[in-house]
């Protein structure tokens, strides 16, 4: 409706001087009075035109820019979380991998990643190259994605998600992949796996979005996607030397706790920012994220206490992260009680996955990237189809527990499709990089540690 109205107002603006002149002849207005009438008409038309265009809201923009910074901080936070859990001879390699992603994926995103993920649709599968090198991505809002913030603000916010997602995968192959292979695999994975899945779920015209799948902040795009790639990595690379009997416990648990705390803090931008504004929906996402994290951390500690006789710090932070993972797709669709239920259930499911399933099947998921992000993300996506309610977000849908079983079925289909695609594509990329460069370091390099063999540096210069 706006385009016809806009043309009418423009035509009226062009005719305004003639109308004013005619009015002066008919009414006897002076020339000055005629100009005043014409100016009033011009101002009215300008106001109409301005109202017809999307306007930048400074409050929304400030929140998105802050949220983008919070999500970027999560990658160094992840480095400390993962780094504290590995052996000291590999601490610096984890830091280096995470920081490399902050540069590597940023360049990929600017050149092709953003346009492939969010650019004009091609058959529901991928974005076109219309926005190559951010051509056409300016400071005016893009109403298809966010009508009250600059297009570049939306772009850079999504860039931070693209950075951290391949970072999650490294938790599965920590302490045994060549750095050169890591860089090539991460770049290819962003191009071949992350960008298409982001378009399917979030891009205008994406087929999972058209199907009606709900993913508020990245349950499928980030966690299921990275979690299945992590499983493929653990299976393809095989076990670390000495796993599981001669692998030492975390070398610096306080670092891991610091990293987990910063992840929790950054997650408010991860989920709250996904409202793409600073209003009620962002508040709901903020609140439900905190509830799920706190609940899951508590339940995991209680499970540790019951099963292993002692509540552990490692278990508590693992539970909190699992809660944040599971609430990610649901944060903008469920109410606080729904978030509480998701926190309880994901802690139980991920506890079983990490403590029993991994041991039963014997795969070496070094830092439980699959056990927490893959399993937790999968459950969170399904749980969205259970507890979602339009009372929270009218743009969403009711879930099974609110009278709409179809939404639960849609979530199952979308999550399974994402999981299968990610696992198969990731496994193929691992094979390709292995044939081209070799994935795994030598046995001697693994014994010495990746800090020295891959980077000629060490995390610590003083011995205890």
Image: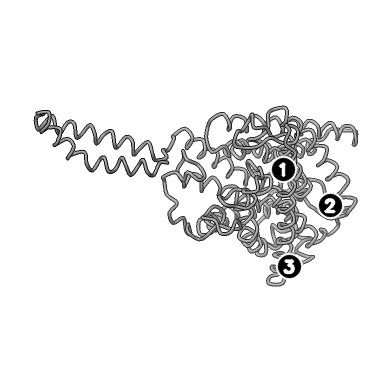
Per the image, the residue denoted by label 3 is 431
453 or 256, which is in the foreground? 256
Per the image, the residue denoted by label 2 is 247
Considering every residue shown, the one lying at the far bottom of the view is: 436
Who's the residue at 62% across and 49% down the image?
A: 210
Pointer 2 or 1: first along the chain: 2
Who's the residue at 72% across and 72% down the image?
A: 435
Considering every residue shown, the one lying at the far front of the view is: 26
Q: Tell me the quarter of the image containing the C terminus.
A: top right
Q: Which of marks 3 and 1 is in front?
A: 1
| 115 displayed left or right of 86 | left
Q: In which quarter of the image is residue 283?
A: top right
Near mark 2 (Cα within 10 A), the count class, few <14, some 14-19 or many ≥20, is: few
315 or 61, which is in the foreground? 61
Q: Position of residue 34 (x, y in %)?
A: 14, 32
Image position of 182 with respect to 69: above or below: below
- Could you give the CA–CA distance between mark 3 and mark 1, rounded to whole angstroms? 29 Å
Per the image, the residue denoted by label 1 is 381
| 156 displayed left or right of 40 | right
Near mark 3 (Cα within 10 A), the count class, few <14, some 14-19 or many ≥20, is: some
Near mark 1 (Cα within 10 A), the count class, few <14, some 14-19 or many ≥20, is: many
**Under tag 2, what secondary structure?**
loop
Pointer 3 or 1: first along the chain: 1
């Amino acid at each position: 409706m706006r385009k016809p109205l806009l043309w009418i107002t423009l035509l009226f603006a062009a005719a305004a001087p003639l109308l004013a002149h005619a009015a002066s002849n008919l009414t006897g207005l002076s020339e000055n009075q005629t100009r005043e009438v014409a100016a009033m008409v011009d101002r009215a038309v300008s106001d109409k035109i301005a109202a017809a265009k999307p306007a930048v809201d400074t409050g929304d923009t400030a929140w998105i820019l802050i949220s983008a910074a919070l999500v970027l901080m999560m990658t160094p936070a992840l480095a400390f979380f993962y780094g504290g859990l590995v052996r000291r001879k590999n601490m610096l390699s984890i830091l280096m991998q995470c920081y490399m992603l902050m540069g590597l994926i940023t360049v990929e995103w600017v050149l092709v990643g953003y346009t492939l993920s969010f650019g004009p649709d091609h058959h529901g599968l991928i974005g076109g190259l219309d926005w190559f090198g951010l051509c056409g991505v300016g400071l005016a809002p893009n109403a298809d994605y966010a009508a009250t913030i600059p297009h570049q603000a939306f772009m850079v916010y999504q860039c931070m998600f693209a950075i951290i997602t391949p970072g999650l995968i490294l938790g599965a192959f920590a302490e045994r992949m060549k750095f050169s292979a890591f860089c090539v695999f991460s770049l290819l994975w962003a191009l071949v796996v992350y960008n298409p899945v982001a378009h399917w779920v979030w891009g205008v015209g994406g087929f999972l979005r058209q199907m009606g799948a709900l993913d508020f902040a990245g349950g499928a795009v980030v966690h299921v996607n990275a979690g299945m790639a992590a499983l493929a990595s653990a299976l393809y690379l095989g076990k670390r030397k000495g796993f599981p009997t001669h692998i030492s416990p975390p070398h610096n648990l306080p670092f891991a706790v610091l990293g987990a705390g910063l992840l929790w803090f950054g997650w408010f931008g991860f989920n709250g920012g996904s409202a793409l504004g600073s209003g009620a929906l962002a508040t709901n996402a903020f609140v439900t994220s905190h509830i799920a994290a706190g609940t899951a951390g508590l339940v995991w500690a209680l499970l540790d206490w019951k099963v292993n006789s002692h509540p552990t710090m490692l278990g508590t932070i693992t539970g909190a992260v699992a809660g944040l993972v599971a609430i990610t797709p649901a944060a903008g669709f469920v109410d606080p009680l729904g978030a509480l239920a998701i926190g309880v259930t994901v802690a139980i499911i991920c506890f079983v996955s990490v403590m029993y399933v991994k041991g039963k099947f014997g795969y070496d998921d070094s830092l439980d990237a699959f056990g927490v992000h893959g399993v937790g993300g999968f459950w969170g996506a399904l749980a969205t189809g259970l507890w979602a309610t339009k009372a929270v977000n009218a743009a969403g849908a009711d879930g099974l527990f609110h009278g709409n079983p179809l939404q639960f079925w849609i979530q199952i289909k979308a999550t399974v499709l994402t999981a299968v695609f990610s696992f198969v594509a990731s496994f193929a990329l691992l094979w390709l990089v292995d044939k081209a460069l070799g994935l795994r370091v030598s046995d001697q390099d693994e014994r010495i540690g990746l800090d020295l063999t891959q980077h000629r540096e060490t995390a610590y210069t003083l011995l205890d």
